[in-house]
């Protein structure tokens, strides 16, 4: 039971903090591309530290509220969660108290906050694309787009998989599909984040190319098997 509560806490904490940081990163890209002369003023070390602390603080508060409210509910439908980790919607299915509506209200409030962040990100990128398309230099446009690409890749992977997990129609829902989708948004994005954010690193590109070339040559030189 304590381990389940710890899983819920850290899952909500890291997910909320990551989404807040992705929102801050969109603002960083907006200032860097649309207002480059004001970048040092708007995003100095103090401003960055304040925004990072706000992101982690928001995640901590959100995790505390959801964990405390979820595990204050009486569970009368057993103690088996039909998931490979403790997830709040599956825990609510085990409750038979009307108090679960409080947690549903918290989830709706969190969803609205996430929607607000998504609208802010969308607005930032609309302004970014407008500014990039007005650049006369092709090299400048390419550099600006390559700066935004890792952030957009991580954001799209997280948002699309999470939206599909929680908003998919009940008609296509199944235990296997639920676990697969939960794996996609809870495990795959954090695992791919270092690779996506490092893809612009030339040393990493050279190492990947060297590894792929080595494997290809090894496969080509492999003797054929006779049956």
Image: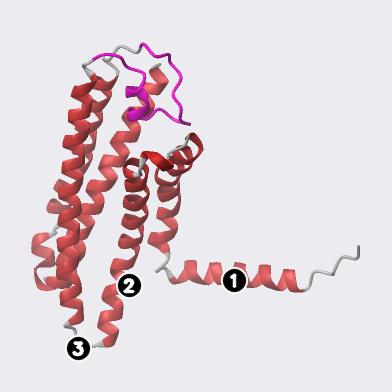
Residue 68 in sight: yes
Most common SS among magenta residues: loop
Q: Look at discs 2 and 1 and give the one toward the viewer.
A: 2
Helix, strand or loop status at disc 2: helix
Decide which of 177, 148 is in the foreground and name it: 177
Residue 210, disc: 1
Could you give the CA–CA distance between mark 2 and mark 1, rounded to whole angstroms?
22 Å
Please tell me whether residue 55 is drawn above or below residue 224 in the rendered image: above
Q: Which residue is mark 3?
A: 136
Helix, strand or loop status at disc 3: loop
Please tell me whether residue 153 is drawn above or below residue 91 in the rendered image: below
Q: Quadrant of the C terminus?
A: bottom right
Residue 115 x/y as whole percent:
18, 48
Q: Is residue 77 covered in magenta?
A: yes
Residue 146, disc: 2
CA neighbours of label 3 inside 10 A, class few (<14), some (14 to 19), many (20+): few
């Amino acid at each position: 039971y304590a381990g389940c509560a710890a899983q819920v806490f850290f899952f909500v904490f890291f997910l909320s903090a990551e989404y807040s940081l992705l929102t801050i990163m969109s603002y960083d890209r907006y200032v860097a591309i649309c207002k480059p002369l004001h970048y040092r003023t708007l995003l100095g070390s103090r401003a960055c530290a304040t925004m990072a602390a706000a992101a982690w603080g928001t995640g901590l508060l959100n995790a505390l509220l959801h964990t405390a409210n979820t595990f204050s509910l009486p569970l009368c439908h057993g103690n088996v969660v039909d998931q490979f980790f403790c997830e709040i919607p599956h825990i609510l299915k085990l409750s038979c108290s009307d108090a679960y509506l409080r947690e549903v209200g918290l989830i709706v409030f969190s969803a609205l906050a996430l929607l607000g962040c998504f609208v802010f990100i969308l607005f930032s990128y609309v302004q970014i694309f407008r500014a990039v398309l007005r650049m006369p230099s092709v090299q400048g446009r390419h550099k600006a787009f390559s700066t935004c690409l890792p952030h957009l890749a991580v954001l799209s992977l997280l948002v699309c998989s999470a939206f599909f997990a929680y908003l998919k129609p009940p008609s296509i829902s199944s235990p296997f599909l639920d676990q697969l989708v939960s794996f996609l948004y809870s495990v795959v994005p954090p695992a791919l984040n270092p690779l996506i954010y490092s893809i612009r690193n030339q040393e990493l590109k050279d190492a990947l190319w060297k590894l792929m070339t080595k494997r290809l040559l090894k496969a080509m030189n492999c003797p054929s098997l006779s049956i």
